[in-house]
Amino acid sequence: MQVRELKVPGAFEFTPVQHGDDRGLFLEWFKVAEVTEAIGHPLNLAQANLSVSRAGTLRGIHFADVPAGQAKYVTCPAGAVLDVIVDIRVGSPTFGTVDAVLLDGKDRRAVYLAEGLGHGFLALEDNSTLTYLCSTGYNPGGEHGINPLDPALDFPWPEDMEFTLSPKDEQAPTLAEAAAAGLLPDYQVCLDYIESLRVK
């Protein structure tokens, strides 16, 4: 498995080795040892999610309060999505930085994002399926969003596609509005929380 750190610190891309023959193929899409080595602590799993989206569906940008936040390990076993991660941690030297990874049923990459980062994706094909391994369960009171069409952020969305958003995502604040409202996680708090996971 190849591991690459993204432009957003605390986010990684994992590319598995695929073993194929005339019957099909086999791969290991999640390996505890490789993930632990990359992120510096074990990824405790509390919930596994699956979403299916038609082409043009734009979901995000979502994040959770820290602590405890929600780290995610995300892959796309069918279809294709443009997966984006945003540094929304107030005080981070890379605040506002965006990176993107193509997740699809060909290369079968996965991405990991640490607690305190924003996450979203655009489905590029019908029936695009994402699976998420999550460090915490769904906590509606601690979940927030940033508008995925915020013009101040450098999202690499294709210009020739019409987007479908949920009303909640469409009405989400911009990054600047979320910061002014005190919704964004604090960089040092995130670092301290992640450090506490390393010493357990």
Image (tube, rainbow, N blue to C red):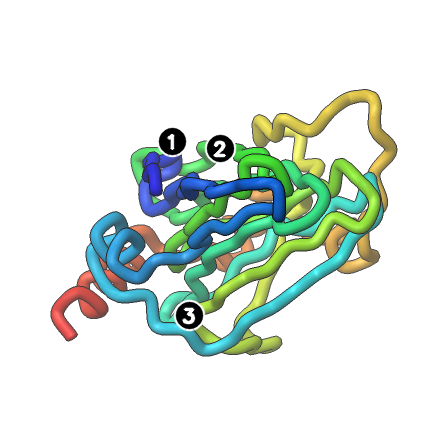
What residue is pinned by disc 1?
7
Residue closest to the far top: 159
x, y percent for residue 21: 55, 41
Q: Residue at x 79, y 46 (%)?
A: 57
Q: Could you tell me how many numbered marks the image carries?
A: 3
Q: CA distance from mark 3 to mark 1?
A: 22 Å
Please say if the residues under marks 2 and 1 sit with CB atoms less than 8 Å apart.
yes
State the SS at label 3: loop
Classify residue 4 by image quadrant.
top left
Q: Residue furthest left?
A: 199
Q: Closer to the camera, 91 or 47? A: 47
Percent of width and height locating residue 194: 25, 61
- How far separated are the C-alphas under marks 3 and 2? 21 Å
* Quadrant, the C terminus: bottom left
Residue 46 position within the rendered picture, expressed as x and y whole percent measured from the top left:
45, 78
Is tag 3's residue or tag 1's residue first in the polypeptide sequence?
1
Residue 131, quarter of the rendered image = bottom right
Circle number at residue 99:
2
The numbered disc on residue 167 is none
Query: Is the Cβ of the residue at disc 3 closer than 8 Å to that at disc 2?
Result: no
Q: Amino acid at mark 3?
A: Ser
